[in-house]
Amino acid sequence: MESEKGLVYVTRKLHFNAAHKLYNPSWSDEKNFEVFGKCSNPNWHGHNFDLYVTVKGIPSPETGFVINLKVLKDIVNSVIVDKIDHRNINLDVDFMKGKIATIENLAIAMWYELLPHLHGVKLHCIKIYETERQFVEYFGE
Ligand code: NI
């Protein structure tokens, strides 16, 4: 069967719970509180994060898939979710060492963690919801 032309964007949603605080270690506690408010509270707080990983590609003529979503799920779980779920982002997550634990920085770090593990598709977007009303998207630029 001949494959039709067309780039398709495919997304897998995943979930993790984690603790963090927003804190710049080169500032005083007062300045951190001024900038980050209660998000800088010393004893951490948690979120239920939603993570959307979008890849793009042309569907295979043999499977009709851009990527097998089970395969994508397994990769994201082993490279990212297993390292961050039920952890402290500031203290426990190797790819966030030395970074301020915002979802902006998380999205960029996750992009570069995932990139070497994706073959045959292009990573398009990492989207992270921290709350229902707050989310970021990173497109690798
Ligand atoms: Ni927070």
Image (spheres, grey):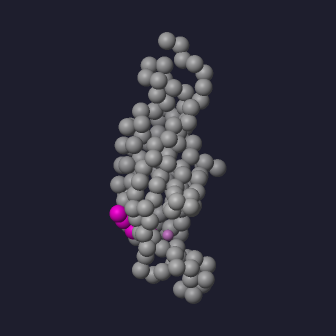
Residue drawn at (41%, 80%) of the image: 43
Task: Residue 61: say if magenta.
Answer: no
In the rendering, at what x and y percent does residue 71 appear? 38, 37
Q: Residue at x 35, y 63 (%)?
A: 86
Q: Which of the pair 3/118 is nearer the observer? A: 3
Q: Is residue 37 above or below residue 118?
A: below
Quarter-of-image position of residue 49 = bottom left
Check the image and report above or below for 68 versus 85.
above
From the viewer's perspective, is residue 114 above or below residue 101?
above
- Residue 122: x and y in percent read 54, 37
- Residue in view at x 48 percent, y 73 percent: 21
Question: Which residue is rendered at x = 55% and y = 27% of the image?
Answer: 58
Tally of numbered discs: 0
Evaluate whether residue 99 shows in this view.
Answer: no
The answer to whether residue 35 is seen in the rendering is yes
Q: Residue furthest top?
A: 1
Residue stretch rendered in magenta on the structure: 86-90
x and y percentages locating residue 31 in the rendered image = 60, 84
Identify the image quadrant of residue 133.
Answer: bottom right
State the residue lying farthest toward the right. 141
Residue 134 in the image, given as x and y percentages of width and height: 56, 61
From this view, report whether residue 24 is shown above or below residue 7.
Answer: below
Q: Report the front residue among 2 and 123.
A: 2
**Which residue is at the front of the view, 1 or 140?**
1
Q: Residue furthest front?
A: 132
